[in-house]
Amino acid sequence: MEEIVNKVANSVLEVFDLEDYYQEGIRTSIDISQWLIEGFLLKEKDFREALKNYNWQQYQGHYVAINCTTDAILPAWASILVASYVAPFSKKVVLGNPTDLETSIYQDEMAKIDFSQYQDKPVILKGCSKKPVPESAYIFAIEKLQQYAKSIMYGEACSAVPLYKSKK
């Protein structure tokens, strides 16, 4: 009987798994509407007083997304003021929803990677993930990888979809 050979394990294929760059930590959304009159009207004096008296320490070490879940029209300074209170306690603050927050975290992580290690190599951009990897992170990854990789595929080694092939 012939020995079964795992061709994927023996290949030169490099796996780029975005899940490896997931940053552990609590993700929190802060809704500005909680400090607005009926969720819509910003009265500056009351707004400033509410922020001043709020317990910002509860966000110690959190990744924070600041947003407004109502259709209130807010001055630009409102979200900046909220950020000024939460920033000393949080790991990161963004204006937007939880997906925007995750996207920003991945952008930061992608900036730290030395993609030259994939120079002239076939790469598979791993698709399945147990952690919340935003689609935008895959865009960041391919943008960087295709500057170096010989080829890029998406998915799993057994059923990858070709995305890019170098013209070198």
Image (cartoon, rainbow, N blue to C red):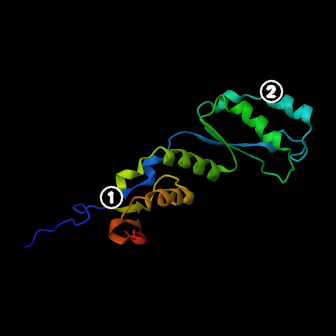
Q: Tell me if residue 95 comes above or below residue 134 in the rendering.
A: above
Q: Mark 1 or mark 2, which is nearer the start of the sequence?
A: 1
Q: Tell me if residue 122 comes above or below residue 57 in the rendering.
A: below
User: What percent of the width, then of the height, locates residue 124?
Assistant: 38, 62
Q: What amino acid is found at the position of numbered circle 1 in the picture?
A: Glu
User: What percent of the width, then of the height, locates residue 58?
Assistant: 66, 30
Tell whether 25 sits left or right of 41: left
Q: Residues within 10 Å of mark 1 (few under 14, many from 20)?
A: some
User: What percent of the width, then of the height, locates residue 31?
Assistant: 75, 44
Q: CA distance from mark 2 to mark 1?
A: 51 Å
For the N terminus, the quadrant is bottom left
In the rendered image, which quarter is residue 135 located in?
Answer: bottom right
Helix, strand or loop status at disc 2: helix
Q: Tell me if residue 154 comes above or below residue 85 in the rendering.
A: below
Q: Residue at x 44, y 58 (%)?
A: 145
Helix, strand or loop status at disc 1: strand
Q: Nearer the viewer, residue 52 or 16?
A: 16
Q: Residue at x 46, y 54 (%)?
A: 130
Tell whether 159 sits left or right of 37: left
Tell whether 38 sits left or right of 167: right
Question: Where is mark 1, residue-wise?
Answer: 14
For the C terminus, the quadrant is bottom left
Do the residues bearing badges 2 and 1 touch, measured as CB atoms within 8 Å? no
Question: Where is mark 2, residue-wise?
Answer: 52
Of all residues shown, which one is farthest toward the front? 168
